Amino acid sequence: MQIIKTAKELSETCRQWHREGKSVVLVPTMGYYHEGHASLMDKARTLGDKVVVSLFVNPTQFGPNEDYASYPRDLERDAAIAGEHGADLLFTPEPSELYAPDAATWVEVPEMSNLLCGITRPIHFRGVCTVCTKLFMLTQADYAVFGDKDWQQQAILRRMVRDLFYPVQIVGVPIVRAEDGLALSSRNVYLTEEERAQAPEIHRALDYARTMVAHGETKASALKDAVLRRWASKLPLGRLDYLQVIDSNSLAQVDEITGPATMACAVKMGKARLIDNIRLN
Ligand code: AMP
């Protein structure tokens, strides 16, 4: 596996691959790998000839009071994992490599970014769309692989790619969970033992809502009430950021389930902010 740090080298390598008729699959990440990241790389391996994994803690998607500086990092371990999971190239640029000092161009999808996570993280998705655009441009990737855990991110990127005719196909990968149901996340390292013990209740309650829908419940308010009641007793260390029933594609809030619906949430526990979601039907 090649490790590349400059945009120029990344672009030249991918251009050469394209000239040789090879397809390129991109897996954008911020590192500190767990099995969720590994499953994205495994999926990428099945989609095309060359797998590019980018490892970049993107400063522009962090708010001023967020964890950019303390975000967990372990390049050596990550490089080993990416190699084991079939990456051909690991791209690990410094921020100055992707953002010129006078960089002034942003890509955003405001209608889908001002809700859910965007309410407490107003600049987050603008940073995500902008850095993904840079990575798509540099790699000219045929496919880009994203996890269903960050459902809002994936829906926004699908819309961006569709609206602007980016020649890349977005591929989603199911959420990888710990045995007790907690969605794997690099930020789970922030949890204390006590918080970690309660955290699986996030998923259990969402799964309970899914069961209610399977038994005929269609009202979002009834589903939310049931989840919040469970959390009140079983997740006392959690502080609710949001809990919403949304249209799975448009992300619009849904009162009555008639089409594809997802329940999405963010819960703060101590230093961590955990997100999760479940497809309800
Ligand atoms: P991150 O490094 O946290 O920015 O995540 C990089 C990619 O991995 C994103 O597409 C995430 O959605 C995906 N991802 C993170 N955690 C999981 C998980 N538990 N299961 C599946 N995909 C995940």
Image (cartoon, rainbow, N blue to C red):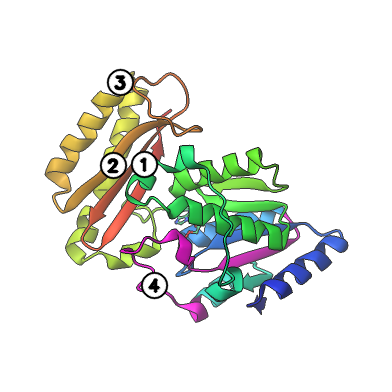
Task: Identify which residue, 219 or 175, lies in the foreground.
Answer: 219
Point out the image quarter for the N terminus. Answer: bottom right
The residue carrying mark 4 has its beta carbon less than 8 Å from ligand 1: no
Residue hosting label 2: 242
Residue hosting label 1: 116
Residue hosting label 4: 72
Is residue 164 covered in magenta? no
Q: Earlier in the sequence, mark 3 or mark 1?
A: 1
**Residue at mark 2 to residue at mark 3: CA–CA distance:** 17 Å
Task: Identify which residue, 254 or 172, lies in the foreground.
Answer: 254
Tell me the element at label 3: loop
- The image shows residue 119, relative to residue 38, as above or below, that is above
Task: Identify which residue, 251 or 37, lies in the foreground.
Answer: 251
Q: Amino acid at mark 1?
A: Leu
Tell me the element at label 2: strand
Q: Earlier in the sequence, mark 2 or mark 1?
A: 1
Our reading of the magenta stretch's main secondary structure is loop
Residue 175 shows up from this direction: no
Q: Position of residue 238 (x, y in %)?
A: 19, 51
Q: Earlier in the sequence, mark 4 or mark 3?
A: 4
Q: Amino acid at mark 4?
A: Pro
Is residue 52 covered in magenta? yes
Range of residues picked out in magenta = 48-77
Instruction: Tell me which residue sits at (47%, 37%) in the image.
Output: 111
Task: Answer with the quarter of the image where residue 19 lies.
Answer: bottom right
Q: Earlier in the sequence, mark 2 or mark 3?
A: 3
Q: Are marks 4 and 2 in contact (CB under 8 Å)?
A: no
Q: Amino acid at mark 2?
A: Tyr
Q: Are marks 2 and 1 in contact (CB under 8 Å)?
A: yes
